[in-house]
Amino acid sequence: MDAIRWEGNTLYLLDQTKLPVTEAWISYTDYRPVADAIRTMVVRGAPAIGVTAAYAYCLAALAGEDLGEARAVLASSRPTAVNLFWALERMANRAEDCGGDPAVLVEEAKAIHAEDVAMCKAMGAYGAAVVPEHARILTHCNAGALATGGYGTALGVIRAAHELGKVEMVYADETRPLLQGARLTAYELVHDHIPATLIADNMAASLMAKGKIDLVVVGCDRMAANGDFANKIGTYSVAVNAHHHGVPFYVALPCSTIDLTLPDGSGIPIEERDKDEVRTLYGVQTAPAQVEVYNPAFDVTPHSLVTGIITEKGVIYPPFKENLSKLFG
Ligand code: MRU
């Protein structure tokens, strides 16, 4: 399964706002609508946003446009996932080396895409090793093939564990307000014939209290140098619940999601989205139109609630600050 394709100097994105009901691809030859596609979540998930931005940068180069401006427009699309800024910086450095040659830049974007898939597969292999036999696993939001170049981070771990016959059940939080768990994770699990049960977000603690969750694995949008990390809103509650019930809690991410410039999670910019995402469900009003709404797209989970960090270089355990810095050493 994939959600990002590059064919004949055209970028194609699977419109994730329409899933799981409709599988529609949108084509792009101009970088500006790609910035809108990231903003409106036609494409979403930290690594997928990075790969998409790299290809969009190529569209600007192919059109002979100002690459500095393209970088700024793309960088303004969403603030939290660091992969966006990481990929744009890598593309800008390459552009400097090659004088903005579009053919070279396309190769660089393709390399970012292919490396992301390879990192997901490596994370899957390392992560599957920490999954016990007959595991009942809980995940939040969508950190799957749709959220990456392919295969997935947290869902990549689940896919790899399933291939080893270790997965008894995956519980997917539906993930209000935009339902990435219900619409996307459930879609991926059903597609791959992985045993799946969808739950509303407020049901996870009850499952843990009943001893029905052996392990939690989630994705990440940005991790600070000490292991604090931002992920989809609600991840923090899952981590608190897991800690209370003694359930191991893992976060899976490529090194491109680690931001060593931030000492801890307090500096991670958290996107606030449109209030109508909470007042409505699929365009249907579910709350008074005038009610005030709080709608942060992400929250920060402190590293003290994390059992282990699964990366493409291996699984890291506390002390996270020291062990994360060794990854880049
Ligand atoms: O708002 P979204 O759908 O882009 O949020 C996605 C998440 O929070 C994912 O868990 C995260 O990006 C990791 S994706 C491998």
Image: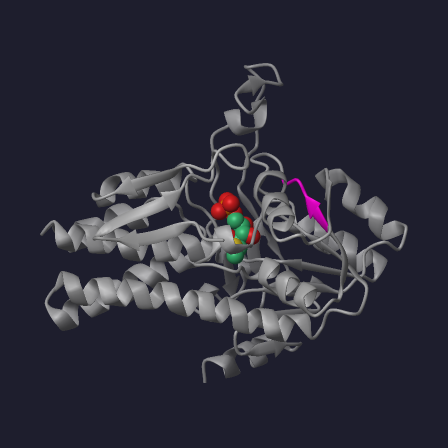
Residue 226 is at least partly visible in this image: no
Observer-nearest residue: 219 or 238?
219
Left or right, 235 with reference to 54: right
Q: Residue at x 21, y 44 (%)?
A: 29
Which residue corresponds to the image point at 51% horizontal and 24% vertical from the top-left?
276
* Quadrant of the image occupied by residue 169: bottom right
Taking the image as shown, residue 271 lies to the left or right of residue 72, namely: right
Image coords of residue 176 (percent x, y):
62, 36
How far across and down, in percent of the image, does residue 56 sit? 26, 51
Given residues 228 and 148, the one toward you in this image is: 148
If the image is split into quadrants, where does the C terminus sit?
Answer: bottom left
Looking at the image, residue 219 lies above or below residue 289: below
Q: In the image, is residue 329 above or below residue 178?
A: below
Please indicate whether residue 154 sits to the left or right of residue 100 in the image.
Answer: right
The rendered magenta stretch, by its main secondary structure, is classed as strand
Observer-nearest residue: 173 or 286?
173
Farthest-out residue, right: 210
In the figure, is residue 306 to the left or right of 273?
right
Span shown in magenta: 171-175
Q: Image height check: is 188 above or below 291?
A: below
Residue 203 locus on image (x, y percent): 78, 41
Of 134 and 53, which appears nearest the observer? Answer: 134
- Which residue is at a point 28% across and 49% down the rendered structure image? 11
Residue 288 visible in this rendered orientation of the protein: yes
- For the point 29% across and 62% down, which residue is it? 109
Q: Is residue 239 magenta?
A: no
